[in-house]
């Protein structure tokens, strides 16, 4: 067991987000909000049974139709949920970071994954095997309720992404996506190439270059190769379509605030 169990803590600093709260001090270890939503004794028991793993960009954690062997509580890593068109073509439909848990199908009684899950930002996660997770879930009404609510937020995110992909312009979609990643990142620096952004948003790379160029021109972001820095968060929210706010407000309504349990 690593030192994570002793270092899990929550920042008291709250950022001016529409609905989500995040750690703002990069030196502070990141916390998983689904674990921090549990009463202290249950959280400690959960963490006791988790192993700490370091996830790397490109790691595939789930494939549609395959059994879910583990659940993951990201504490720094960010995971994309991808709907697959064929072996080579995918569209990102959701993001799981410190706000969530990967493997919620188990909480619904479904043993197989329905989406591909790929690590998009390296970092730490706490991992628990499926059998232990089911046992913990059976013993915790708080966790069952919390994960039901989280699943509802995730469904909102999936539905809103469908709306976003169909109706909104690339620049607004890019802004929304950067906000979602920023909420789950320890600081303002995001390691993202234009190629990855294009893949995530299901658009051509040239479209990302144009959209990112507008954001840079307006001094909302700056970027060098593979490294985007958000320099004006409020302006990025202005540039985003309403999809970001819809999901953030749903999360704020259904999930407990993140500074409640340290
Ligand atoms: Zn949108």
Image (cartoon, rainbow, N blue to C red):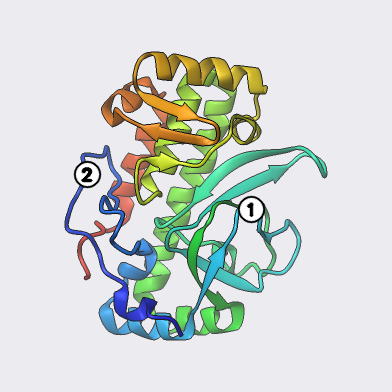
176 up-or-down from 212: above or below: below
Local secondary structure at mark 1: strand
Q: Which mark is residue 126?
A: none
Residue 147 in the image, given as x and y percentages of width and height:
43, 64
- 156 vs 26, left or right, is right
Residue at 30% x, 74% y is 7
Q: Which mark is residue 118?
A: 1
Q: How many marks?
A: 2
Q: Residues within 10 Å of mark 1 (few under 14, many from 20)?
A: many
* Viewer can see residue 168: no
The quadrant in which residue 234 appears is top left
Between 32 and 249, the one nearer to me in the picture = 32
Local secondary structure at mark 2: loop
261 up-or-down from 253: above or below: below
Between 198 and 249, the one nearer to me in the picture = 198
Residue 102 in the image, given as x and y percentages of width and height:
54, 61
Give the residue number, with chain letter if any, for mark 2: 15
Between 172 and 24, the one nearer to me in the picture = 24
Marked residue nearer the N-terminal end (2 or 1): 2
Between 136 and 78, the one nearer to me in the picture = 78
Residue at 52% x, 27% y is 164
Q: Residues within 10 Å of mark 2 (few under 14, many from 20)?
A: few
Q: Is mark 2 within 8 Å of ligand 1?
A: no
15 up-or-down from 76: above or below: above
Structural distance between the alpha carbons of marks 2 and 1: 28 Å
- 129 vs 50, left or right, is right
Residue at 27% x, 49% y is 21
Residue at 48% x, 80% y is 50
Residue 146 in the image, given as x and y percentages of width and height:
37, 64
Residue reaching furthest to the right = 87
* Viewer can see residue 162: yes
């Amino acid at each position: 067991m690593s030192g994570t169990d002793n270092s899990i803590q929550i920042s008291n600093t709250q950022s001016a987000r529409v609905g989500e709260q995040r750690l703002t001090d990069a030196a502070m270890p990141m916390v998983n909000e689904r674990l921090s939503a549990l009463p202290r004794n249950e959280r400690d028991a959960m963490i006791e049974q988790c192993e700490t793993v370091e996830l790397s960009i490109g790691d595939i954690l789930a494939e549609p139709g395959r059994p879910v062997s583990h659940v993951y509580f990201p504490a720094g890593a960010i995971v994309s949920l991808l709907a697959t068109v064929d072996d080579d073509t995918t569209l990102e439909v959701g993001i799981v970071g410190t706000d969530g848990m990967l493997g919620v199908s188990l909480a619904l009684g479904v043993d197989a994954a329905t989406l591909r899950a790929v690590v998009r930002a390296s970092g730490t996660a706490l991992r628990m095997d499926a059998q232990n997770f089911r046992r913990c879930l059976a013993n915790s009404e708080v966790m069952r309720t919390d994960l039901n609510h989280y699943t509802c937020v995730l469904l909102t995110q999936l539905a809103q992404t469908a709306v976003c992909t169909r109706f909104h312009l690339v620049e607004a979609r890019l802004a929304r996506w950067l906000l979602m990643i920023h909420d789950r990142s320890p600081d303002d620096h995001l390691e993202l190439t234009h190629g990855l952004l294009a893949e995530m948003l299901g658009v051509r790379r040239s479209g990302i270059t144009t959209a990112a160029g507008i954001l840079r021109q307006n001094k909302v972001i700056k970027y060098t190769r593979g490294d985007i820095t958000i320099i004006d968060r409020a302006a990025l929210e202005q540039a985003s379509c309403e999809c970001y706010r819809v999901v953030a407000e749903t999360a704020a309504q259904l999930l407990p605030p993140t500074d409640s349990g340290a």
